[in-house]
Amino acid sequence: MSAGAPATLRVADVTKCFGAVTAVDAVSLDVRANEFLCLLGPSGCGKTTLLRMMAGFEAPDSGRVFIGDDDMTATPPHARPVNMMFQSYALFPHMSVEGNVAFGLKQEGLRGEALNARVKEALAVVELEGLGARKPHQLSGGQRQRVALARCLAKRPRVLLLDEPLAALDKHLRERTQRELTALRHRLGISFVVVTHDQDEAMAMADRVAVMDRGKILQIAPPRELYERPANRAVAAFFGDVNIWEGEVVAGNKVHCAALQIAFPVTDLLPVGSRVEAAVRPEQIAFTSIDALLTGVVSDVVYRGTASTYFVRHAGGAVIRVARQNSGPETFQRGDTVGLSWPTSAVRVLTS
Amino acid sequence: MKPKRFSWPGAALIAGLVFLYLPLVVVIVYSFNESRLVTVWTGFSTRWYGELMADSQLLRAAGVSLTVALLSATIATVLGTLAGFVLTRFGFFRGRALLVGTIAAPLVMPEVITGLSLLLVFVALEQGFAWMPGRGILTIVLAHASLTMSYVAIVVQARLAGMERDIEEAAADLGATPATVFRTITLPLIFPAVAAGWLLAFVLSLDDLVIASFVAGPQSTTLPMMVFSSIRLGVSPKINALAAILVLLTAVLLVVAARVQRGSKPAESSAG
Ligand SMILES: Nc1ncnc2c1ncn2[C@@H]1O[C@H](COP(=O)(O)OP(=O)(O)OP(=O)(O)O)[C@@H](O)[C@H]1O
Ligand SMILES: [Mg+2]
């Protein structure tokens, strides 16, 4: 995927209200050719509604939906060259697996040998060759999910929309399916738009992630950029653990944090006197005995397998979260006094 | 093992079953009574069945009733299914409240009123347009269909309301036009409700006396009308035989309905 690739699907300034609830609020979004885009956000933030507007199940109150170069805002779902995989899979219970996969192809007028070949091909992609004659209720959850996927893939859509495709799967199967989905994307050359509320899943699969909250897109960026350069507090908080302190910019390109009673340098150039928030990831804070930026007392330790999270209480009352690999030489106990420091590059200044 | 003890729920169940089925059992038993007096048992005989078969008037009425029931149930099923579909799947539209009212009205309206108003309409049609002169099977069919389509609509509506829309949406997403979605997805999935609705409409039509009495013409006496008028002249044991046959027919229909319902649930075992 290159940044200049043409958009296969474009949502322009789309708004959708349900009564008093604004489910999607002036959202604009490009899906590039062969891109894997994740829509990420807490429950009820409008992810499904946005996806349903792309598929044509909801008409936006305002704004437009383009697929390729065509304005498809008013086009009904059956005439759009995109396919959606439902969270519930929505398999046709009265048809066999083959019947389910063939359904969409029959609508295109495909019959006989050509139809069979395409059905076989789609079932082979999801490795369900032997199960064509079964009914959906004779399949496991993971197999049903593959049928739903095969049913969409058989249509060879330009964009595949998936609403929480992995939510119903156990951890093991979920990880395997994540890898399979990304592999499929590379093999088939179609764009994926995947809804999820699991940030790890989004990070693992996506080229870009659109973080949504209350109907708005907060930031669209590659996972790494979201993690390292979050645009605001909400995005930072959504991606893993983060320490956020309010402060004021002082001379020398430093931020003074009242809660920590220190000023520390930042990389961003900011006007003196402006109020900002500084964010530092727990894993970027180190224990140190020399040149400590500040000292505190370990108030709690949470063991997490390969790493532990230390809660360090500062004299000013602030609690700082520090993550540390458990493979290191020494460990700290509750009540230990420790010095903390972090590199200047670890500090992210958040405006708004 | 302890001896079986008296239990209230068991007794209540038996009392309930007796209450429901005793009249039917009595009718069936007496249909094999030899005596001409309906209430005196003198011995086993099938003579009343024979006499029933020889009674051309009664057979003709049975024919009328079955024809009316078949036609009206079919019309009611088509219209009721569409009405139920529209009410659950079309969201808001102009005149929706009117349609809801139209469907609820026959359910709550006294049959006498329904029958009378239908009669007035048919008479007006006859006078105004010379349509359906003298009334007959067709008027009963229309009257029954207009009543029973409400029941079908309610049954279908309940089924559709309980069915997730995503299956139909998935079909549309895969390129099926709304008509194709209805034909290939919705209809097969609600078929048990449609079939149950048809049976309900059929039985309701077969059973109706009041409305049929209003709208029937001289040549179209239905079975209930015939039975009712003949009872007023004195009960013949033939009626018992007829009732026994009707009970049997209804039982068969109920079993069929249960089969259809069960056959629709894929998770059930295929045995039986
Ligand atoms: N058909 C509808 N009628 C009324 N309100 C709706 C409808 N669909 C969605 N909403 C509301 O719009 C908002 C966004 O819903 P949406 O389903 O898009 O959220 P979501 O991000 O998919 O959430 P989740 O992660 O729980 O699936 C919610 O407040 C929801 O209650
Ligand atoms: Mg959702």
Image: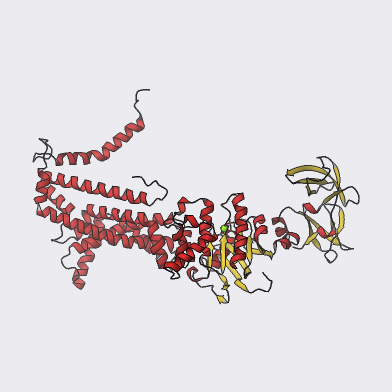
Residue found at x 54% / y 52%: A142
**Residue A307 shown left or right of residue A35 in the figure:** right
Position of the C terminus of chain B, as image quadrant, is: top left
Q: Quadrant of residue A189?
A: bottom right
Position of residue B123 measured from the top left corner of the image (x, y, whole percent): 20, 66
**Is B80 on the left-hand or right-hand side of A332?**
left
Ligand 2 rendered quadrant:
bottom right
The x and y percentages for residue B121 are: 23, 65
Looking at the image, residue B240 sits to the left or right of residue B256; the answer is left
Q: Residue A258 appears in which quarter of the rendering?
A: bottom right
Seen at 24% across and 63% down, the residue is B142
Q: Nearer the viewer, residue A102 or B229?
A: A102
Determine the image quadrant of residue A327: top right
Mark yes or no: residue B91 visible: no
Q: Nearer the viewer, residue A7 or A152?
A: A152
Instruction: Examine the rendering and report whether any part of residue B201 can be seen.
Output: yes
